[in-house]
Image (spheres, grey):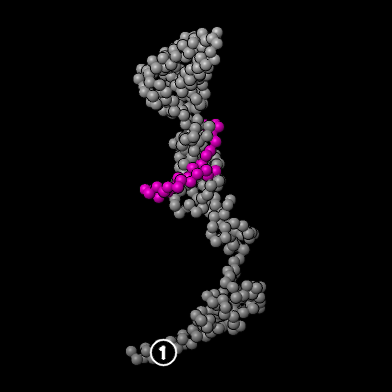
Amino acid sequence: MKKILLFNIPIVILAFVAGMLFKGSSKPIRTDGLTEHASHSNVAFYTCSMHPSVKLQDPNAKCPICAMDLIPVTSGTDDLAGFPSLSLSPRAIKLAEIETTAVERKFVETEIRMVGKVEYDETRLSYITAWVPGRLDRLYVDYTGVAVNRGDHLVDLYSPDLLSAQEELLQAIQTSESLKASESNFLKSKSLANIESTKEKLRLWGLSEDQISAIEESGTSSDHITINSPISGIVVHKDALEGMYVKTGNRVYTIADLSKVWVKLDAYESDLPWLHYGQAVEFRTEAYPGQVFKGQIAFIDPILNSSTRTVKIRVNLPNPDGKLKPDMFVRATVKSRVAKGGACHES
């Protein structure tokens, strides 16, 4: 047993000495995009990859801060000395897909995204109501969605009150005719005033000037009045049926002019500093993919919805082709410029 141990001792000693000689004679391989050795002639100095401020000339030295091996810096790379930098070979640049662009001075833009719906323009809604009590003998529009033009017949209304007013007009006209030969200017003026007051009564009950003129020319009264459409648009609500008795003010139809619509958007309260009146807005819809609609902010609701924590933003939008329909879902974007101090800049 002792002989075996004595025989192994020289082998161990020889292996240790060989390992030390090999360690002292070799130098770790260093890379900066290509495989390089420390014996390059164009090495300017040696630095630490973790601490680039270290610059030493001894290739065998260690970093005095972290004790790491130093890496060589060639003479062509010392123009950025003292600044953190990363050097890549052309092949590494291609693999990293690095792209560069020229530096330019401009406003920073933030993009605000909102969702909302298309709605009726409230200023272009018209309600067809009964101006006198009576019975709806005929409805010319039987269902919603029908397009009507200004002046189209909508309702035939039977009204005893209207019949009485027409009789008053005819009697006032007969009285005025009989007083033409009279020498009393007072009676003549009173009769003319009576005619005008009766006509005004009929106007307030919904008769047009043409209808009143027809009564004067024919000399006969009618117990029915035809209600015409005051605007061109789409019948969006039908609130009555034929044969119903209505009172003054009862609604029969609702007509909407869809040549212009409103787009109501929901904006979070955190986005309000970036939104202002007159700002350009772009819309996209599910029905017309790829098509962009453009408008401007016309109104910002002063009241916050406590449930959704959003504020309604209204955009007035022309709709000549009728593509945008009420309740259609839209997605909108607003680009706001960030000026000095983080304030919203007028775009």
**Looking at the image, is 236 positioned above or below residue 78?**
above
Q: Quadrant of residue 105?
A: bottom right
Q: Is residue 143 visible?
A: no
Residue 163, x across and y down, in percent: 42, 14
Q: Is residue 310 found inside the magenta-colored segment of the image?
A: yes
Residue 145, x across and y down, in percent: 45, 26
Query: Is residue 244 or residue 98 the one in the foreground?
Result: 244
Q: Residue at x 44, y 28 (%)?
A: 127
**Looking at the image, is 339 positioned above or below residue 282?**
below
Query: Is residue 192 or residue 209 the one in the foreground?
Result: 192
* Label 1 secondary element: helix
Query: Is residue 146 or residue 175 the one in the foreground?
Result: 175
Residue 16, x across and y down, in percent: 46, 86
Q: Quadrant of residue 182?
A: top right
Q: Which residue extends farthest left?
A: 1
Q: Residue at x 51, y 41 (%)?
A: 315
Q: Residue at x 62, y 79 (%)?
A: 45
Q: Is residue 339 found inside the magenta-colored segment of the image?
A: no
- The count of marks equals 1
Q: Is residue 233 visible?
A: yes
**Looking at the image, is 103 positioned above or below residue 158?**
below
List the residue tagged with mark 1. 9
Residue type marked 1? Ile
The residue segment tinted magenta is 296-322
Report the side of 92 relative to 206 (left or right).
right
Query: Is residue 286 or residue 110 the one in the foreground?
Result: 110
